[in-house]
Amino acid sequence: MKTIKAYRVTCTEAYMMDEQGTGYSFSPWGQDTDRYKGYDEEVEVLIPDDAIVEDGLMPGCPLLFLAGAKMGMDLPEALAVGAAKLA
């Protein structure tokens, strides 16, 4: 297993209520604006040694590719895989 650096990003205020919440990204929270406020926390994500991490179609939205997999996983799924491998 190896670790990668990521950010747990939390949007506390947003223009649309459904934009609030927590997600994961390779990029930290940007600057607060009059409509968006939030924060980030740097985290280390445990992933399998054979995993490849690449940026997805949207900047800051990483994908994780496991050996033999045809599709990538997003970072929350990668966290679940890492936790399952530890159990």
Image (spheres, rainbow, N blue to C red):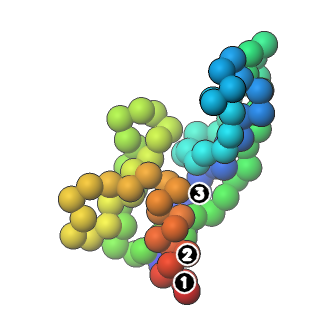
**Amino acid bearing label 3:** Lys
Q: Percent position (x, y) of residue 41?
A: 73, 49
Residue that numbered label 3 is attached to:
5
* 80 up-or-down from 61: above or below: below
- Residue 12 is left or right of residue 3, and the answer is right
| 3D distance between C-alphas at marks 1 and 2 | 5 Å
Residue found 55% across the figure and 75% down from its top: 83
Residue placed most toward the observer, 53 or 86: 86
Label 1 close to label 2 by CB (< 8 Å): yes
Q: Residues within 10 Å of mark 3 (few under 14, many from 20)?
A: few
Q: Percent position (x, y) of residue 3?
A: 54, 68
Residue found 67% across the figure and 58% down from its top: 43
- Mark 2 or mark 3, whichever is nearer to me: 2
Q: Residues within 10 Å of mark 1 (few under 14, many from 20)?
A: few
Residue found 52% across the figure and 56% down from its top: 76
Q: Percent position (x, y) of residue 4?
A: 54, 61
Identify the disc placed on residue 77. none
Residue that numbered label 1 is attached to:
86
| 3D distance between C-alphas at marks 2 and 3 | 16 Å
Direction bottom: furthest residue: 87
**Amino acid bearing label 1:** Leu
Q: Quadrant of the C terminus?
A: bottom right
For the residue labelled by badge 2, is the local secondary structure a helix, a strand or a loop?
helix
- Residue 84 is left or right of residue 12, and the answer is left
Residue found 76% across the figure and 38% down from its top: 39
Residue that numbered label 2 is attached to:
83
For the residue labelled by badge 3, is the local secondary structure a helix, a strand or a loop?
strand
Q: Please indicate, yes or no, whether residue 13 appears anywhere in the rendered image.
A: yes
- Mark 3 or mark 1, whichever is nearer to me: 1
Residue placed most toward the observer, 63 or 27: 63
Going from N to C along the chain, the mark reached first, 2 or 3, is: 3
- Residue 21 is left or right of residue 45, and the answer is right
